[in-house]
Image (spheres, rainbow, N blue to C red):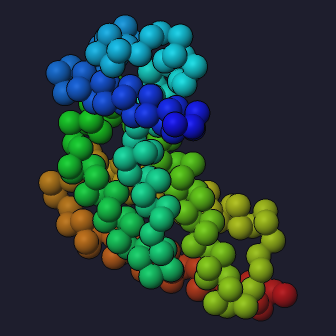
Amino acid sequence: MTHAVASLNTKRTLANSLRKAMEKKPFSKVTVTEIIKDSGVNRKTFYYHFQDIYSLLKWMVQQDAVDVVKNFDIESDFGKAIVFVMNYVEQNSHLVFCAYDSVGHDVVKSFFYDDFIELMKKYIIINERKHNLVLNERYRAFLSRFYTEALSGMLMDWIKDKESVDKQYVADVISKTILSSLNGIFDDYKSLS
């Protein structure tokens, strides 16, 4: 077994222990001691892989959902990627709400942010090509942050009040809004060039 595989297996073992602990109590009450005791991993190994319990939680959420979203063909499946994240939240509501209640809106939002910004940048580049454009990097980075803030903000609102919102409707509206506004931006950008 390679070091990378062993490392990934150790991280998964720690994540499973965290998941079990969060089913019993709030994230803020879970300790590293509990995690290492349940997992059979020593404290030094825990800190070799994770800076703290928050970084373990972030890694776990990213592994569970956001990394999978990266593998979607976002050109044709952008809405499906959004629905996938929403389904993940529903299926893992105890985990997400435990984290949300313990560490707050901004921390949970940050778990998704880095991956969503890469997803948005990829989506913008795909649409640039369709319009035979190449935006300057600074403007592309701005648009990626802008849409990521909107997307992650909408998803955080949905997490708080998911009972009253239709997932497919939200995904469709987000997808259409982003694509429509990008098309308008690209048309304006062409006229300025």
What is the quadrant of the C terminus in the image? bottom right
67 sits left or right of 34 in the view? right
- What residue lies at 25% left-to-right and 71% top-to-bottom? 168
Q: Nearer the viewer, residue 183 or 84?
A: 84
State the residue at coordinates (44%, 82%).
76
Residue 81 lies, in percent from the top left, at 39, 66
Residue 179 in view in this figure: yes
**Is 51 placed left or right of 15 in the picture?**
right
Towards the viewer: 46 or 110 = 46
Where is residue 98, by image quadrant?
A: top left
Q: In the image, is 192 to the left or to the right of 1? A: right
On screen, residue 188 above or below 29: below
> What's the residue at 45%, 69% (across, down)?
72
Q: Where residue 106 sits in the image (x, y, percent)?
A: 46, 37
- Asked if residue 30 shows in the view, the reply is no
Residue 85, by quadrant, is bottom left
The structure residue drawn at horizontal position 50% and vertical position 80%, both measured from the top left corner, is: 75
Q: Is residue 66 above or below residue 140?
A: above
